[in-house]
Image (spheres, rainbow, N blue to C red):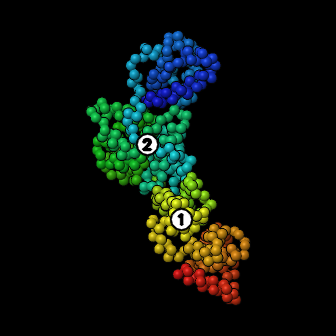
Amino acid sequence: MPETISELNRIWSRVLEELQVKIDDSHYFSAFLDKSHIHSFDDNAMVVAVNSMLAVNFLSKNYQTFIQNAVKEITGRNVKVTFDVADNLKSAPKTVFEENKYFKYSIVNESLSFENFIAGPCNIEAKQAALLIAKNPGYRDYNPLFIYSDSGLGKTHLLSAIANYTRESASGKRALYCTGTDFLEEYMLVAGGEKEFNQLKEYIVSYDILIIDDVQMIGGKEKTTDFLFQVFQKMYTLGKQVVISSDKHPSELKGFDERLKSRFAGGLSISIASPDVETCVSIIKSKINAGPLDINAFDQDVLEFIGSKFSKNIRNIDEALNKLVFYTTAFKPTKHIDMAIAMEALQPLVDVRVEKQKLNEQRIIAIVADYYSLTPAQIVGNSRESNIALARHVSMYLIRALLDVPFTKIGMTFGGKDHSTVMNGVQKVEKELKINTNLQEAINELKKRLK
């Protein structure tokens, strides 16, 4: 199997680390292994270049099995290791590619991992499939893995996570990550004839996993898609993994011939849907925890507002959070972020006037909270303090009176409270309104504000 020079050096460095423990005499280690390196690593044969024939004999007799076991532990492959004098190995091994000869500008975002990918009903299957592929590349039923969705829903995160997992694991497997645009540009940069294109193909196929993000960018480029078909066929025949993402299901791709679309659909195709509000809130919390602000500074209704308004594209969530962070740290510093602050900060991104005018449970709670100098989180919480309990009951009453929402649904808005609890709260306000002029004035004022 072809390897890059840096990968061969990495493997040998790890072997030497284990050998240094085995050969406890530093003089022996230095004398026999000085300037040693892997000359070639092809299929199940490894040739190690050493500094003398004496070193060849010494290592072959005493440490060949140990080195073979070490290589197996590092790469997961049973390898026959032999030694030769470096001067006898003049020609460069045909299986070694120059590092970064191709795809020099294909960069994987190292911060994108399986650990920080927030899963929900919309994407859990895609995450599970990607993780399975990362751990067991080449499994026939899941080859290729084809993930498709609208833009900004996590495809790039999952594909990058596969590449990062492979790089960090001790399996010895190697993944090549590129975008569809990268693949197209690399093909167009190849100068020459069939030999040069074959070299590019062999370079790609030298990897255990080929990852192409946004493959739709190649559509309509007949020669490039034909080249991709050749690469795909060889990867598949050799039992190597292909992972692809797109904005459409394979059958709906434009500019790809039927044979290639058929290959794309021949493995496991999984879609990612827009996240629900609950999943969005989890994503938002994760992003806040990774940033400069304290999650406890946010009212829950602010998180739910951002989640509901920007759920169609996670990049829009990033934009909203960045705007909010900038506004509350640089422009209007505050230690507490409520709906009023959020509306001010996000005004360029949403029609705030419409949101303010839209009467819903969250707006009623926010207005009542402001009237009683509380936070929405206190009102929907479980505190039994008299002033908070009164505001809670007033909120329930107004939601019931103005929106005609069922008691059960109101209870869900207030943290999953039982419908009978909500009913009792509403009835208390109705009874008190008949005799309490202060409460009558409060309700009238709140209704004015809500209009």
Identify the residue shown where x is 66% and y is 84%.
Answer: 439
* Residue 173 % position (x, y): 50, 34
Residue 387 left/right relative to 146: right
Q: Which residue type carries mark 2?
A: Ile
Give the residue at mark 1. 332
Q: How many marks?
A: 2
Position above or below: 229 against 42: below
Identify the element where label 1 is drawn.
Answer: loop
- The residue closer to the viewer here, 419 or 321, is 321
* Residue 67 % position (x, y): 56, 22
The quadrant holding residue 223 is top left
* Residue 231 % position (x, y): 37, 37
Residue 27 left/right relative to 428: left
Question: Which quadrant is the N terminus positioned in?
Answer: top left
* Residue 198 % position (x, y): 33, 32
Identify the residue shown where x is 63% and y is 79%.
Answer: 397
Residue 251 left/right relative to 356: left
Specify the label residue 107 is tagged with.
2
Question: What residue occupies the far right of the structure in this picture?
Answer: 385
For label 2, the crowd category at 10 Å Cα-Cα, with few meaning under 14, some 14 to 19 and many 20 or more, is: few
Identify the element where label 2 is drawn.
Answer: loop
